[in-house]
Amino acid sequence: MGYTSEQLCASDFVSITHHDDVEPGIGALESMVSGLTDVYRTEKRLLHADGHDIWVTLSTTVVRDDDRPLYFLSHFLDITDRKQFESRLQHLADHDPLTGMANRHSFEATLNRHVSTVARHGHAGALLVLDLDHFKQINDTLGHSAGDELIASLASVVRRRLRPTDVIGRLGGDEFAVMLPYSSRDHAEHVASNLLDAIRAEVTVLRGAHQRKVTTSIGIAMFDDPNLTGAEILINADLAMYDAKEAGRDRYAVHETAETRPTTRARLAWVDRITHALDHDRFILYAQPIMHLATRKIARHELLLRMIAEDGTIISPATFLSVAEKFGLISRIDRWVVDHAITALAAHPDHELAFEINLSGVSMGDNDLLTFIEQRLAESPGIKPSQLTFEVTETAAVANLGDAASSPTA
């Protein structure tokens, strides 16, 4: 602790204990002196001679002569390294490694706490969702390293334009969210306008020897309905952001009610159609043959998903998959495809069939998907796992690359 023995012997435990840990310690010592307890064990902070904290585990007992307490006997173990390691792990669990800002899980937890506050004390604040314009084109033409640099640059610009009380998080890919807890609509629009100007002026990406300006689209949703959940507020801001993109990008839009917004009504109608199709088995799979060029034999089939409309027409996935991903229905669709693919294989045990199945990048974050696949295969003992190949589509970013890389389904 940086003290000499003489200095320590001339001190009491209060003077070398972090002020937040003094009161619990006094209570524990008094309890032992009175005979209510025999041992006190805890983790606490001591003060080093130069002023910094030292974390220790403390085990204290009281030594008595008959019933009279004589002194305390304490054992200290320095656990500062462990505490620092735990702190780093917690930071990694709650923060995006590329930008250092809150990740989606952490941001949504903060958002839900604010929603609870709004429900108790009345509406206050706004939520902004930012999405870079044409980010996929940048990734595809300049590579993912350029995309990462762009994301980090955007995060830095946004962070500098916000107040300490504002909360910013990276939801995934090139999508960010900003919560303004104490903001009116006018102030939220002012912040959005400033962010658009700053990103347009400061965020650039190199293309050859030339710098290329980057723009973003922003959606704003107000905390003006105490009955809405955090997820619903986030959806409202997301819908407004897509309105900004459809209006020409490089601008912001404020969420309005579904009754006054035809774009929102159209998306919600598609949500209902997709949900109805899932509930009533109104999807179909087409098996597209894949030919081995050397042998001219059909080696396997790629399964292509289509939706069956009420009038019997076939709907392309390009029409409904983006809506399914945005509104959390894509995992149900992927499970439907896997389930029916395995059923088809089980129905033709004498054929050497093998299927390629497209899965959304969102499903790579579904921890239960592998369990579901294993369960269905176990229920169909005649099927070999090698008869299934899973491919990740490019329609959505993989939310957790670490988990996806270690997943046996990847």
Image (cartoon, helix red, strand yellow):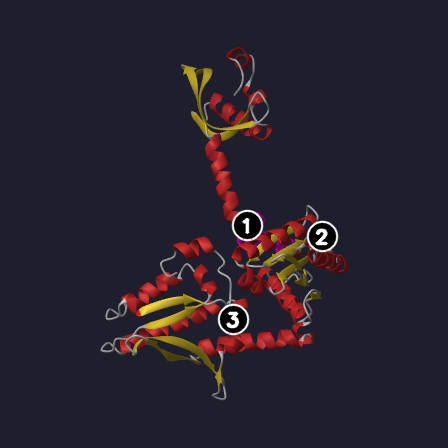
Residue underneath mark 1: 98
Q: Secondary structure at mark 3?
A: helix
On the image, which quarter does residue 363 sit in?
A: bottom left
In-front residue for pair 228/354: 354
Which x, y percent locates residue 27?
Answer: 53, 27
Which x, y percent locates residue 257?
Answer: 68, 71
Which x, y percent locates residue 229?
Answer: 59, 61
Range drawn in magenta = 100-117
Which of disc 3 and disc 2 is earlier in sequence? 2
Which of the two discs, 2 and 3, sits closer to the camera? 3
For label 1, the crowd category at 10 Å Cα-Cα, with few meaning under 14, some 14 to 19 and many 20 or more, is few
Residue 81 vertical placement versus 128 (above, below): above
Q: What residue occupies the far front of the structure in this picture?
A: 209
Residue underneath mark 3: 324
Q: What residue occupies the far bottom of the structure in this picture?
A: 311
Q: Secondary structure at mark 1?
A: loop
Which x, y percent locates residue 3?
Answer: 54, 16
Q: Secondary structure of the magenta portion, mostly?
A: helix
Which of disc 2 and disc 1 is earlier in sequence? 1
In-front residue for pair 249/22: 249
Q: Is residue 114 magenta-colored?
A: yes
Identify the amino acid type marked 3.
Answer: Ala
Residue 230 — which label?
none
Identify the amino acid type marked 1.
Answer: Leu
Identify the amino acid type marked 2.
Answer: Tyr
User: Separation of disc 1 and disc 3 at Cα?
Assistant: 27 Å
